[in-house]
Image: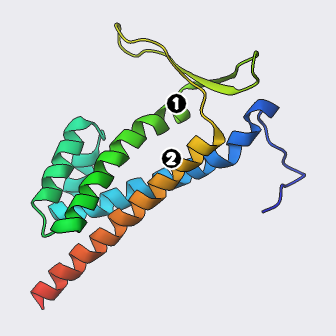
Amino acid sequence: MTDDPDQPDLVDVFYRSLVRPLGNLVITFAQAEAALLELVTELDGTEENARRILKNLDDAALERVIELIKTSDLTGFDLAELLEAAVSFWKDRERRNRYIHDEWFPDLTTGAAMTRGLPRKRAATTMFDAPSPEEVWALAKRFRENGSLFSITAHKLRTIRSDNLA
């Protein structure tokens, strides 16, 4: 991968170490979200139902996804691993949302890039974070791994269904 000299980074120098990790995070999250839709479609029967379940990606959606996973044909390690991945996805999604939607600014005393999340609710507090590139890479990697698991499991469920119909 080479830098394009005709299109330099648009961000200031204190953000540059985060440009690639954040770019990877955006892509791996989108892929994991699409794979989750694919999985929920297989678990619930139709893409329309899956879209309705995942519309807000809130706690109610997580509860419904967990319920669908528990009532699937999965057992043992496959079941435990998928349940863990679903919970991880929701937890990691919150952190991803902070990085994507919060304000970015430099800490002038250390030169580190920081985020500030303004409260959306009256009693909430302002949230600050100073993610390292390594933390963002790790988050992107978890989305890639969970997305792969969602996709592989959806494929397994389709295969089981088609074998049962044959």
Residue furthest to the top in view is 123
Q: Disc 2 residue type?
A: Leu
Q: Position of residue 79 (x, y in %)?
A: 20, 63
Q: Position of residue 84 (x, y in %)?
A: 28, 52
Q: Is residue 47 visible?
A: no
* Residue 130 tag number: none
Name the residue carrying label 1: 101
Q: Residue at x 69, y 43 (%)?
A: 19
Badge 1 local density, few (<14 within 10 Å), some, or many (20+)?
few
- Name the side, left or right, on which 91 lies relative to 40: right
Q: Residue at x 36, y 65 (%)?
A: 149
Q: Identify the image quadrant of the C terminus.
A: bottom left
- Name the side, left or right, on which 8 lies relative to 17: right
Residue furthest to the bottom in view is 166
Q: Residue at x 46, y 35 (%)?
A: 95
Q: Identify the image quadrant of the N terminus.
A: bottom right
Mark 2 in CB contact with mark 1 (< 8 angstroms) = no
Q: Disc 1 residue type?
A: His
Q: Is residue 86 visible?
A: yes
Q: Position of residue 56 (x, y in %)?
A: 30, 39
Badge 2 local density, few (<14 within 10 Å), some, or many (20+)?
many
Q: Residue at x 28, y 60 (%)?
A: 81
Q: Secondary structure at mark 2?
A: helix
Q: Mark 2 against mark 1, which lies toward the viewer?
A: 2
Q: CA distance from mark 2 to mark 1?
A: 16 Å
Residue furthest to the front in view is 77
Q: Secondary structure at mark 1?
A: helix
**Residue 68 quadrant:** bottom left
- Name the side, left or right, on which 69 lies relative to 9: left
Q: Nearer the viewer, residue 16 or 137?
A: 137
Name the residue carrying label 2: 139
